[in-house]
Image (cartoon, rainbow, N blue to C red):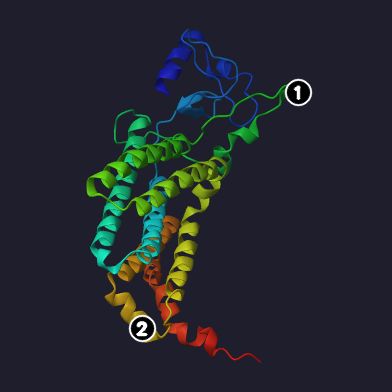
Amino acid sequence: MGDYYNLISKNHNSIDDLIDPRCPGYYCGRRLLANGRTSDCGSCPTGTRVNAFHMCQPCTDTPSSYDWMYLLFMAVVPLLFHAVYIDLSSISWASQVKSDNSRNKTKTKIVLYISATLEVITAATLAVLAVDPLGQISIRSCRTQWLSDWYTVLYNPTPDYHEPLRCTQEAVYPMYSMIFIFYLGCVITLLTFRPIFSAYFNLSGSLYLKTLYAGLYFFPIAAVTHAFLGGIIYMTFPYIVIVLSVVSSAIHFATEINQSTRYLIVNTVCVPRNILIVAIHWISHGFGIVAITQLANPPVDYALLLLVPLPTVFYIATTRISEPSKILVL
């Protein structure tokens, strides 16, 4: 901002000379030209947003802890999708092959898990490197102030009810565009890493192709969803995480044929796959609580973390009275 005002002072006696008349709308601003004068009102370039003086000011903020948690959420969702689809597909595939191929099944699953993790980590790293400052593991951003910051296209003003003034811009730079870069990187790494791992480790063609095609379907759908609901997801992702973790935990236990309390406890503690699934649910639940509270009130907020195991404990404790076969129909 200091550079702006130094240039302004050479051509204007006061800032009021620069901002008179003010730009219409919430997101229309003026750019400072090379000769020290200002442009007409319009959209701000990428990496800038309009300030209180109706000037396009460079984004100099660092992402808040909430912003980082949002980016982490958006990065983990594709990884969880890959992991869940690989797990479910491997179960379906295992029922169709001979039992003496159990070692090959396990190897295929592990390799696909490793490949999916490397794909997402690589894509996330490339997305960070691709935004300002270019080539650095850091982000220069504009802080989100209102939900409308995500939907500037809906706030183009129409001065004097004539032609609308196009002021659409990324007021939340780079939180919106960065996700599209990340999804593109995920597709590229998916089409690069997955075939290499498959060829090197001689993976099953059926399972490998199913997981590959699933990813190619997922990312376009995710990109369209982000394009229209990015701001809503940003505002509500902690609640989405908590609700989905509770629902997913209930579904996980409900799929067990034996619904006795003892069996559920033993099966959860002794089976590595179930231990991992429950751990993911607990981590997701805790993540959602931290994202909502930001641990701003430590005594109370830390106490809320004690609720993390509650959905699991509640399901197991009430399974005897919620078993459909034990409910009397009057």
Q: Residue at x 53, y 16 (%)?
A: 14
User: Crowding near pointer 2: few (<14 within 10 Å), some, many (20+)?
Assistant: some
* Residue 57, position as x, y percentages in the image: 47, 26
Residue lying farthest right? 161
Count of numbered badges drawn on the protein: 2
* Residue 234, position as x, y percentages in the image: 49, 47
User: In the figure, residue 187 lies in which quadrant?
Assistant: top left
Location of residue 54 with respect to 66 vertically, above or below: above
Location of residue 35 with respect to 278 vertically, above or below: above
Q: Specify the amino acid type for callout 1.
A: Asp
In the drawing, what numbered circle is on residue 160? 1
Kind of element beneath mark 1: helix
The quadrant in which the N terminus is found is top left
Observer able to see residue 302: no
Nearer-N-terminus badge (1/2): 1
- Alpha carbon separation for disc pair 1 and 2: 72 Å
Q: Residue at x 44, y 78 (%)?
A: 315
User: Crowding near pointer 1: few (<14 within 10 Å), some, many (20+)?
Assistant: few
* Residue 119, position as x, y percentages in the image: 32, 44
* Residue 306, position as x, y percentages in the image: 37, 71
The quadrant in which the C terminus is found is bottom right
Image depth: mark 1 or mark 2 in front: 2
In the drawing, what numbered circle is on residue 263? 2
User: In the figure, residue 93 lies in which quadrant?
Assistant: bottom left
Observer able to see residue 43: yes
Mark 1 in CB contact with mark 2 (< 8 angstroms) = no
Kind of element beneath mark 2: helix
In the drawing, what numbered circle is on residue 185? none
Location of residue 322 with respect to 290 vertically, above or below: below
Location of residue 36 with respect to 181 vertically, above or below: above
Q: Specify the amino acid type for callout 2.
A: Tyr
Q: Residue at x 49, y 36 (%)?
A: 172
